[in-house]
Image (cartoon, rainbow, N blue to C red):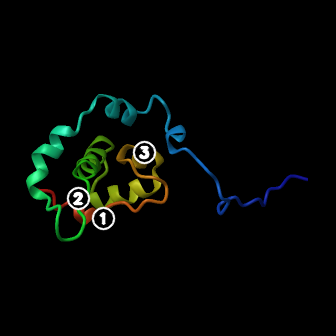
Amino acid sequence: MEKWGKDARREAVIVDLDMLVPKDHLLRKIEKVMDYDWLYERLEGYYCHNNGRPGTDPVVLIKMVLLQHLFGIPSLRQTYREVQVNLAYRWFLGYGLLDEIPHFATVSLLP
């Protein structure tokens, strides 16, 4: 008899997120050619490194907006939701499966 009622949703798994994103995915192609160093230099003045709460990586914020426009997501709120469940989007942002995604309101406050 087949195990039709099997439920693996809570199964512990060790996984390499990189292996789950197809090699020919558009986001891999973008990541291969992009250089974000200029962005860190340009936004350095907006981040205070010695007080206050930790900032969000500006590259992540820009990439979230890029995801929104590339994939026709209608709002930053919806982009936030999509990043939570889409493995390729998480990979593109550099986040693991259990990492907390920056809130959509953080992204909308870009300088």
Measure the alpha-carbon separation of dots 1 and 2: 7 Å
Q: Residue furthest left?
A: 45
Kindly check if marks 1 and 2 are in contact, taking CB atoms under 8 A apart as contact.
yes
SS category of the residue bearing label 3: helix
Q: Earlier in the sequence, mark 3 or mark 1?
A: 3
Q: Quadrant of the C terminus?
A: bottom left
Q: Amino acid at mark 1?
A: His
Measure the alpha-carbon separation of dots 3 and 2: 18 Å
Image spot of residue 100 (x, y percent): 40, 62
Disc ID at residue 107: 2
> Which of these two is toward me, 42 or 51?
51
SS category of the residue bearing label 1: loop
Image spot of residue 35 (x, y percent): 24, 34
Where 53 falls versus 69 (above or below)? below
Q: Say left or right for 63 vs 40.
A: right
Q: Quadrant of residue 33?
A: top left
SS category of the residue bearing label 2: helix
| Residue pictured at 12% horizontal, 51% vertical | 44
Where 70 falls versus 60 (above or below)? above
Q: Which residue is mark 3?
A: 91
Kindly check if marks 3 and 1 are in contact, taking CB atoms under 8 A apart as contact.
no
Q: Which residue is mark 1?
A: 103
| Residue pictured at 25% horizontal, 59% vertical | 56
> Which of these two is toward me, 66 or 93?
93
| Number of marks | 3
| Residue pictured at 22% horizontal, 39% vertical | 36
Q: Amino acid at mark 3?
A: Trp
| Mark 1 residue crowding within 10 angstroms, few (<14) / some (14–19) / many (20+) | some
Measure the alpha-carbon separation of dots 3 and 1: 17 Å
Q: Quadrant of residue 42?
A: top left
